[in-house]
Image (cartoon, rainbow, N blue to C red):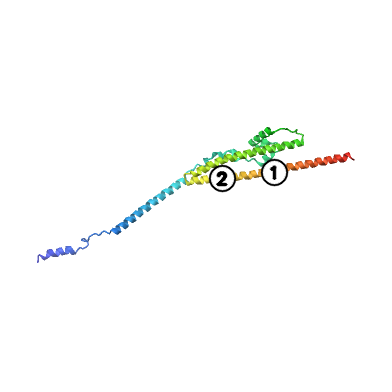
Amino acid sequence: MKPLIPLAVIGALAFGSPASAQLVVHDPTSYASLLRQATTALDQLKELQAQVAEAKRLYDGFNTASGAGALASLLKAPELRAFVPDIDKYVAAAKGDLAALGELGAQANAIRADARLYTAPTDDVLGQDLERQGDRTARDLALGRAVADAGAQRLDGLNELLAALDSAPNARAVMDLQARLAAEQALIVNDHMRLQGLAMAQDAEARLQAQRDRERAAAQADARLQLFRRAFQ
């Protein structure tokens, strides 16, 4: 009976603990699937990191001064911001007060002096009308030159802003430059409206002068008629 004990022990060892004797089996398909999932997750993580970096770059750009206000400083020059004269001073200049227009009046005086061929006596009504017409012409010519000069300088400044827009480093700079361009366009529209008002004043002055000429002619004709009647009474 003794030889049976070792055999029983051997049998127990061989069949009593099947878990410890089980072989580990590797599935290549499952391993490849796990590898693909890991690779996909890594790619997604890298993409998320890139998105976060881009978001940080945009955030930093929005919180960084663009310096757009310092560009095209020529557009802030007083001769461009206020080259259209006040309507009251503009009308007063037609009555001989060209100095009221400041620098524009000085230019008008220079034009008037250069073109003058005759100076009417102060007690000559017709001569004073002639003087006022000369002052108006000099004033309008000076204003026309000022408008042309302002337009040329503004064009240079606007081109500078457009060039900066093409090379803007971030979205904040683009937005600031667009806002600056919109503000300059609004100023141009406002100046255009004021110039239209001055043009209306010029037209009214011309019509008023024509009315004065007609009234003067009528008064002179009436005076001659009265003289003629008295002569034959």
Residue linked to disc 1: 203
- The answer to which of 60 and 1 lies nearer the viewer is 60
Mark 1, other Cα within 10 Å: few <14 / some 14–19 / many ≥20 = few
Residue 95 visible to the viewer: no
User: How far across and down, in percent of the image, does residue 219 sit?
Assistant: 80, 41
User: How far across and down, in percent of the image, does residue 53 sit?
Assistant: 41, 48
Left or right side of 34 for 145: right
Q: Which residue is depicted at the point 57% across and 44% down?
A: 184
Can you say whether 158 is above or below 31 in the image?
Answer: above
What kind of residue is marked 2?
Ala
Q: Which residue is depicted at the point 55% across and 40% down?
A: 157
> How many labels were placed on the picture?
2
Residue linked to disc 2: 183
User: How far across and down, in percent of the image, does residue 103 sit?
Assistant: 63, 35
Q: Which residue is depicted at the point 71% across and 42% down?
A: 206
Mark 2, other Cα within 10 Å: few <14 / some 14–19 / many ≥20 = few
What kind of residue is marked 1?
Asp
- The answer to which of 113 and 62 lies nearer the viewer is 113
Can you say whether 69 is above or below 41 in the image?
Answer: above
Q: Are marks 1 and 2 in contact (CB under 8 Å)?
A: no
Mark 1: secondary structure: helix
> Which mark's residue is nearer the viewer, 1 or 2?
1
Residue 5 visible to the viewer: yes
